[in-house]
Image (spheres, grey):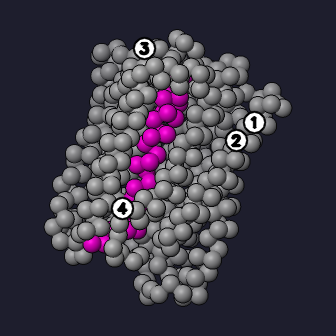
Amino acid sequence: MTDQANLSYKKIVKFWIPISATWLMMAIEMPFLTAVIARLPNPEFNLAAFGVAYSIALIAESPVMMALSAATALVENKNTFLKLRNFIYTLNSLLAVLMVLFILPPVFNFFAYTLLQLPEGVANLTHTAIIFLIPWAPAIGYRRFYQGILIRQKLTRYIAYGTIIRILSMAGSALIMFLFTGVNGVIIGAASLSCGVIMEAIAARVMSYNSVRKLYDGTVASLREISFKEIYDFYLPLALTSFISLGFQPVVTFFISHSKNALESLAVMPVLNSLVFLFRGFGLSIPEVVIALMGTKENYVKLKKSAVALGVILVSALGIISFTPLAQMWLVNISGLSIELARFSLVPLMIYSIFPSLTVWMNFQRAVLIWGKNTNPLTKGIVIEISGMFMILFLGVNIIDAPGIVAAVVAMVLGRLASNFYLISSFETTLRELKQINSLS
């Protein structure tokens, strides 16, 4: 895939920085938008609605989340490009149709009132926000496909450029609406998110023009053929992994909405998620780095050591915030929460501090499995994670009567740990089976 000789830690960092910077800049979105919403009228209702709408958008996005990894692993020539492109475009179209169907009153009302039992004010705001988020998933599938092509050809700096365009578009549209309109905060959040990803998708296509032309011209030397069935068999476990993981968010919302301190928990959930995502995003960039750079035992060892170091740094950095007065500063002065909501957030934030390191571990395991074309264990791993989360949420909310946000955070941490431990066996088996890498474990 790339020249694998003499891979150094400097090369790993140089390759990783633009991709991780992309996740970091995306992670800024939620703290920025929740801070804007928190400073507008009815912040608790708008923050709660934004959190619910965003969880729906994540579910819609989940089937195309792995388009980047798939393009990085599979696109080698014109044939593989066209087959995977058509596959992703079809998936994007289906997601847009499903989002339109979801906002129809009978469907949405059943979800919002019957399943989640949201307060009417939160439900109405959520419905409006989802309308503005309809372009979200197709735009993300489109841009992640072309970003994967850029990463495969080691043009990772363009990924960062595209994300800068996204952030500027998102922030610009949010500030314009904040300063010059009187719309609800949840509309500002949803509309700004969609504006940002649409602009980034356009940028990704423009910046990948030369890379695509190389595939058409045959400049990239590869005779590999691929069928839609091969793409389906490779991609389905990846899509299911994302879908099950992100699709569980409404279940979390359901339990929180039926828990002790329900409204407070729904209001602080997007704030805590956005802070943790600032650190977790660094780990989300690992799969593309490993897929692109791993090829020998020596490379694997260096990539593994780099991942371990990253995990330690992330949990330490977030811990410094969570367990010191910096937490109050972030939650009140930056995120705009009231003193009461900030105090309510402290314990779950402390528990949440370990999550970025678990993300690093999970994504390194996933990267090796994807590199070895062994994607089936990923689905089983996420099923274990979600099952554990469900049981802990049920116990926390219905038996222990813990505040919803505390039960949710504990469930996410312990569920992720269970999945990580399950994948150890498949991870080590994959390493042994790879002819290019002998007994890496």
* Residue 378 x %, y %: 31, 54
Q: Residues within 10 Å of mark 3 (few under 14, many from 20)?
A: some
Residue 429 is inside the magenta segment: no
Q: Residue at x 35, y 69 (%)?
A: 7
> Mark 1–mark 2 contact, CB under 8 Å?
yes
**Camera sees residue 146:** yes
Front-lying residue, 69 or 93: 69
* Disc 3 versus disc 2: nearer the observer: 2
Which image quadrant: the N terminus? bottom left
Label ID, residue 171: 2
CA distance separating discs 2 and 4: 34 Å
Which three-letter amino acid code belongs to the residue tagged 3? Lys
* Residue 19 x %, y %: 50, 57
CA distance separating discs 1 and 3: 35 Å
Q: Secondary structure at mark 4?
A: helix
* Residue 122 x %, y %: 62, 23
CA distance separating discs 1 and 4: 40 Å
Q: N-terminal of the two: label 3 or label 4?
A: 4
Residue 290 is inside the magenta segment: yes
Q: Which residue is mark 1?
A: 175
Q: From the viewer's perspective, is residue 422 above or below residue 370?
A: above
Q: Which residue is mark 4?
A: 9
Q: N-terminal of the two: label 1 or label 3?
A: 1
Q: Residue at x 47, y 79 (%)?
A: 76
**Camera sees residue 239:** no
Which image quadrant: the C terminus? bottom left
CA distance separating discs 1 and 2: 6 Å
Which three-letter amino acid code belongs to the residue tagged 1? Leu
The residue at the far top in this view is 340
